[in-house]
Amino acid sequence: MIEGAAARSTRNQQAAHSVGPDSIGQVVPVVRDYIALTKPRIISLLLLTTVATMFVADPSGPALSLILWTMLGGYLAAGGAGAINHYIDRNRDARMARTSSRPLVSGRISPAHGLIFGITLGLASFVQLWLTVNPLSAALAMLGLLGYVFLYTLWLKPLTPQNIVIGGSAGAVPPLVGWAAASGSLTWEALWPFAIIFFWTPPHFWALSLMIKDDYARTGVPMLPVVKGEAETRRQILIYTLIMFGVTIGPYVTGLLGSIYLVSAIALGATFTAFSVALYRHPTPALTLRTYLYSLSYLALLFIAMAVDAVA
């Protein structure tokens, strides 16, 4: 019996050792890589626009549980789209310095596992939103995923320099999900946050593409600066910034939002316009980077202003 107890003790020690720091140290990088497939930095901005729009649709304030369920479903849908995008773009990513270390490119995660992961997240998002929020929000989230994968990544991205203009509609879907989650329906007013992101996407993404145009040229992706040149890209950035600026005034003109939002939209839009004008007239790599970074802050602050105005 003593020998049996000793044997059991040895087995218990071995089992404890098997889940020790070394095992955890092996699991953590794998989990980190799978999270990276979901593109969490991009999703954080998408979720902010989703939640802010929920308060515009329901100024009395959506229930915290509804907000959390909507955020979870939004993360799963956008994360699934991101993972599938990693799978589709893995060969292009291997030829770009910015993306050459991504999990599927480096072999840390097999392409098949990455694809299965993305599809699983997308299906989980649809079921979860359907059961915990409402069918409309589930359908819209799936529409955004399919639009990003099929309309943008598979069709438009390798076909035309206007890929981000048309394909950007997929990235503008999260506010519609938020509106549908908070109100249970869609009205024409829900098109304002959709339109803002739609027209924000080209100047935001083209600023990034100016910085990595050589990578796009190597992969054969016809991004605007590769096909039309940097000067035309900067001109298009300015044009779309001005259109976007005008669109952001729409929610005030139609009575959806009030003076807090209007002042914020004018101040933020004027600053964005100043960046775009400066980039058009006196382009430098440093200014291109600042314009790109400001575009991220711009969208976040504008949607925060929407939510603040709606509940004020």
Image (spheres, rainbow, N blue to C red):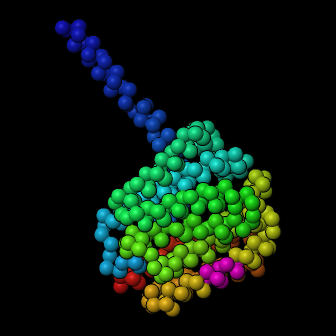
Examine the image and state in which quarter residue 91 appears. top right
Q: Residue at x 73, y 48 (%)?
A: 95
Q: Position of residue 142 (x, y in %)?
A: 50, 59
Chief secondary structure of the magenta portion: helix
| The stretch drawn in magenta includes residue 33 | no
Q: Is residue 118 visible?
A: yes
Residue at x 53% of width, y 84% of height: 265
Compare residues 242 and 13 and report the one nearer the observer.
Answer: 242
Q: Which residues are magenta?
A: 238-245
Which residue lies most toward the left here? 1
Residue 213 appears anywhere in the view: no
Query: Which residue is rendered at x = 55% and y = 50% of the image?
Result: 83
Nearer the observer, 280 or 151: 151
Does the segment drawn in magenta span residue 241?
A: yes
Q: Quadrant of residue 151?
A: bottom right
- Which residue: 37% across, 30% down? 19
For residue 16, side relative to residue 92 (left or right): left
- How far across and down, in percent of the image, does residue 25 sit? 45, 36
Vertical arrangement, residue 34 with respect to residue 303, above or below: above
Query: Split into 4 quadrants, where in the image is the N terminus?
Result: top left
In the depicted view, which residue is nearer to us: 213 or 150? 150
- Report whether 160 appears left or right of 306: right
Whole-percent x, y for residue 8 in the image: 26, 16
In x, y percent, where is residue 107?
Answer: 61, 38
Q: Is residue 149 left or right of residue 1?
A: right
